[in-house]
Image: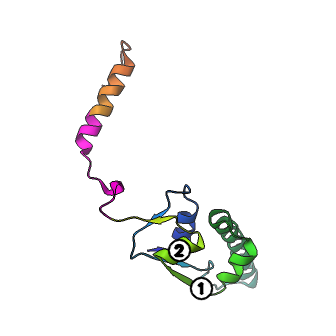
């Protein structure tokens, strides 16, 4: 699931690499404030912040999805749900990915760590590390 800001971040990923699982759902909706209380000026400030955040959110969605800000603002006046293929068609993601795909390939992280440490040691060459940093 990618809801709200998570869906926006997904849309801003590198084109061609934005993937969803086949049964994933995505939801776009406008930012909101759950409660507002206090002095009128405090509520006014929160309202202005919400307006600014909403504009920025829509701007980022437009950048990631590739649609106009006006079209996105119209589309998400009410929460909008997408199944994986609908999210791809809308431009939030590029493809579906299955757990059997290469992206889920099991890796031997201990071996990768050892290899990385060995490469660092060989790159350091004859330089001596300060005492306490070994």
Q: Would residue 133 be visible to someone looking at this image?
A: no
Left or right side of 1 for 39: right
Residue 106's place in the image compared with 21, above or below, is above
Q: Is residue 55 magenta?
A: no
Q: Position of residue 109 (x, y in %)?
A: 26, 44
Judging from the image, the colouring scheme is: rainbow
Q: Which residue is mark 2?
A: 87
Residue at 28% over, 39% down: 112
Magenta segment, which residues? 99-114
Residue 110's place in the image compared with 37, above or below, is above
Left or right side of 55 for 99: left
Classify the position of the N terminus by image quarter. Answer: bottom left
| Camera-nearest label, 2 or 1 | 2
Mark 2 closeness class: few <14, some 14–19, many ≥20 residues within 10 Å: many
Classify the position of the C terminus by image quarter. Answer: top left
Q: Is residue 107 magenta?
A: yes
Q: Residue 51 lies in what quarter of the image?
A: bottom right
Q: Label 2 vs label 1: CA separation?
A: 30 Å
Residue at 34% over, 20% down: 122
Q: Residue 61 lies in what quarter of the image?
A: bottom right
Between 124 and 84, the residue placed more toward the observer is 84
Q: For residue 119, which numbered disc appears in the image?
A: none
Residue 129's place in the image compared with 32, above or below, is above
Residue 9's place in the image compared with 75, above or below, is above
- Residue that sits furthest to the top in the current view: 126
Residue at 38% over, 19% down: 124
Q: Position of residue 114 (x, y in %)?
A: 26, 34
Q: Position of residue 43 (x, y in %)?
A: 71, 82
Q: For residue 35, which numbered disc appears in the image?
A: 1
Q: Position of residue 57 (x, y in %)?
A: 66, 69
């Amino acid at each position: 699931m990618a809801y709200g800001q998570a869906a926006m971040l997904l849309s801003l990923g590198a084109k061609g690499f934005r993937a969803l699982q086949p049964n994933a759902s995505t939801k776009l909706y406008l930012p909101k404030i759950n409660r507002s209380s206090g002095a009128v000026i405090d509520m006014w400030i929160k309202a202005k912040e919400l307006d600014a955040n909403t504009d920025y959110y829509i701007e980022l969605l437009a950048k990631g999805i590739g649609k106009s800000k006006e079209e996105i603002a119209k589309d998400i006046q009410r929460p909008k749900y997408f199944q994986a293929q609908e999210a791809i068609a809308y431009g939030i993601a590029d493809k579906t990915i299955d757990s059997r795909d290469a992206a889920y390939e099991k890796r031997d992280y201990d071996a990768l760590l050892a290899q990385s440490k060995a490469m660092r040691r060989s790159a350091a060459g004859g330089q001596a590390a300060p005492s306490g940093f070994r």
